[in-house]
Amino acid sequence: MQKKIIIYTDGACSNNQSTENTGGYGAVLLYGSHEKEIFGGEKNTTNNIMELKAVIEALKLVKNKSIPIEIYTDSAYIANCIHQKWYVNWQKNGWKNSKKEAVKNKELWIALLELIEEFKDISVIKVKGHSGVELNERADALANKGIESIK
């Protein structure tokens, strides 16, 4: 049986549309019998930024780039971008979206795509949020812990 790294990520933002909001990210990383949880938070952010940070910060912790990785996220923003390769056109169009507007969170997307390139085998799997998927619920709880850590 081939070993793989399993990562569940989540981002959260309290008062997402206001200028005085707080956001958090969380991730659970599993490899064999090893398990690690991470979380963090920021002020004046968005849910999508926190979703991206969760994946980025989790991938930064992986030392062996040759082990297959499965990233589970409830973020359609991340899953759709990776699966539908939105980033290919963004890059081709000078980081403009289909509406010819600047891609939001460009720096984080660049950081994530550069990280992904370092790995041999990464897959992103979309899970339904808040539906009882145990590790997704744990990642959500860690994201909320990230929010609380900066209040």
Image (spheres, helix red, strand yellow):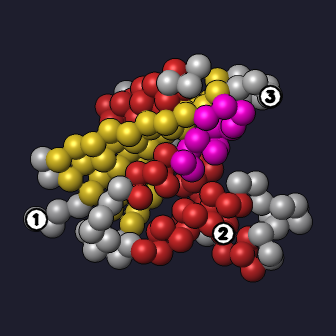
Q: Secondary structure at mark 2?
A: helix
x and y percentages locating residue 1 in the rendered image: 10, 65
In the image as oriented, which residue stretches furthest toward the bottom? 92
x and y percentages locating residue 123 in the rendered image: 40, 63
Q: Is residue 131 visible?
A: no
**Numbered range of the magenta stretch:** 42-53
Q: Secondary structure at mark 1?
A: loop
Give the answer, above or below, for where 85 lies relative to 30: below
The residue labelled by disc 3 is 19
The residue labelled by disc 2 is 87
Residue flagged by tag 1: what amino acid is it? Met
Residue at the image position 42 percent from the left and 74 percent from the top: 118
Lower position in the chain sequence, tag 1 or tag 3: 1
Is residue 133 found inside the magenta-colored segment of the image?
no
Q: Between tags 1 and 3, which lies in front?
A: 3
Q: Dot 1: within a 10 Å radius of its alpha carbon, few (fewer than 14), some, or many (20 or more) residues?
A: few
Residue flagged by tag 2: what amino acid is it? Tyr
Please state the total of marks drawn on the protein image: 3
